[in-house]
Amino acid sequence: MNDERSTAPRAAPAHVPMSQYGLSGDELVVGGKPISVLATQVGQTPFYAYDRGLLAARAAQLRQALPAGVKLHYAMKANPMPALVALMARLVDGIDVASAGELKVALDAGADAAEVSFAGPGKRDIELHQAVAAGVLVNVESARELPVLAQASQALGLPARVAVRVNPDFELKGSGMKMGGGSKQFGVDAEAVPALLSQIGKLQLQFEGFHLFAGSQNLRAESICEAQRLSYELARQLAGHAPAPVRFLNLGGGFGIPYFPGEQRLDLQPIGENLAALQERARTELPEASLVIELGRYLVGEAGVYVTRVVDRKVSRGQVYLVCDGGLNHHLSASGNFGQVLRKNYPATIGNRAGSRAGNTTRETASAVGPLCTPLDLLADRMELPVAQAGDLLVIFQSGAYGASASPQGFLGHPVYAEVLVGAVNS
């Protein structure tokens, strides 16, 4: 019997096309401008650029996919740039913050305090007082926070609005970073929540609901749906111990974006259908509750690029190195040092030679590195890129989330990056 199986090598998986950006000639277009023109406008490299049109389009896409009445919150930890937060405050229903510093940015940006929630372990007493004074919702993560909130409420003559962040007894399968389940520093273990709810009632805090966040960066719709169903059911059970009706039920997020070769974009349709079913249950089981989805990366990640200039082209024993003026000091995530177990390349191109996407420019295998004195400063490892020379612009895609603010810009004293919000919101 003949074996007809092919012995040809399989093609390596490719990055999903970065089709959200267009071309002008050979140049990548960001915010309506060729990348070289944009770099001149910014006046320096490296820089981050976030496209208003893409941010608005992603919010609109979510609105279309999610059932009416489900609230969309922006988790500003993903990108706290003030101008971007001001735009997002107009595009979403609420803002989720993780520090008093983020709270100030959100309020300065015009966010409605009634729709701002404050999560995070280790909240300082002064931060809890600030939250009560501002009138925002505090996602309680420890019993330690309760008497502090009660004291702040009494001193200020204002209600301390609280929800309980629950550490569930399940994990979000397939998530890049697990934020709940098992032993975690986040939230209150589900089995300890009834006692905490009793204490909230005794202290006369204004209980409003629950916050559950099982994990992040998940590209499997079925896993997200399962976590939402389990989160809803757990909240429904815990509601029986609550001192007041549930009015706020944050089911978390976890929606991922494709960073690495072989990954595909998340299918929103089953998630929307699942949320519609949960919303229908809530009408009778939790009739005063608004369901909330909290997203950061999914809202802003694909709308941003990091741009750094090639300052030197070197060949070392046959391997091409493009040495750039920015690296892990500005974009720790792209270097693989922000949560990756096995380093993989973000999608990237030479922005002023990006016409090669249509086959117009010669390509080669090259590694792009930053200017730091460490081998960890690697932005692209032996990646197929347009042939580049000193002066060209390396563009790292998928850089709108966990880029600038998540990077050690003070490391080794190199110049800081710039950040710009560009383009227009299409009407």
Image: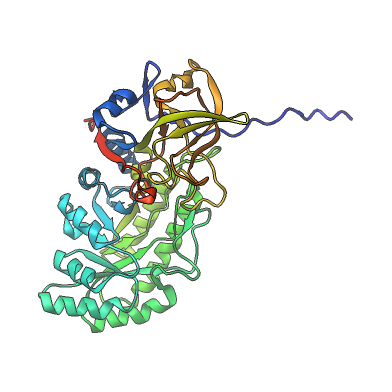
378 vs 60, nearest the viewer: 378
The image position of residue 287, as x and y in percent, is 28, 64
For residue 161, say whether it is visible.
no
**In the image, 191: left or right of 69?**
right
For residue 167, say whether it is visible.
yes
Indicate whether 192 appears above or below 329.
below
- Colour scheme employed for the rendering of this structure: rainbow
Indicate whether 397 appears above or below 405.
above
**In the image, 15: left or right of 253?**
right
The image position of residue 341, as x and y in percent, is 55, 52
Q: Residue furthest right?
A: 1
Q: Residue furthest left?
A: 157
The image position of residue 13, as x and y in percent, is 59, 34
The image position of residue 191, as x and y in percent, is 44, 77
Quadrant that contains the N terminus: top right
Identify which residue is drawn at 52% across, 45% down. Answer: 375
Identify which residue is drawn at 40% across, 26% down. Answer: 351
Q: Quadrant of residue 427?
A: top left
How many numbered marks, from 0 up? 0
119 vs 213, nearest the viewer: 119
Q: Residue furthest bottom?
A: 202
Identify which residue is drawn at 26% across, 67% down. Answer: 138
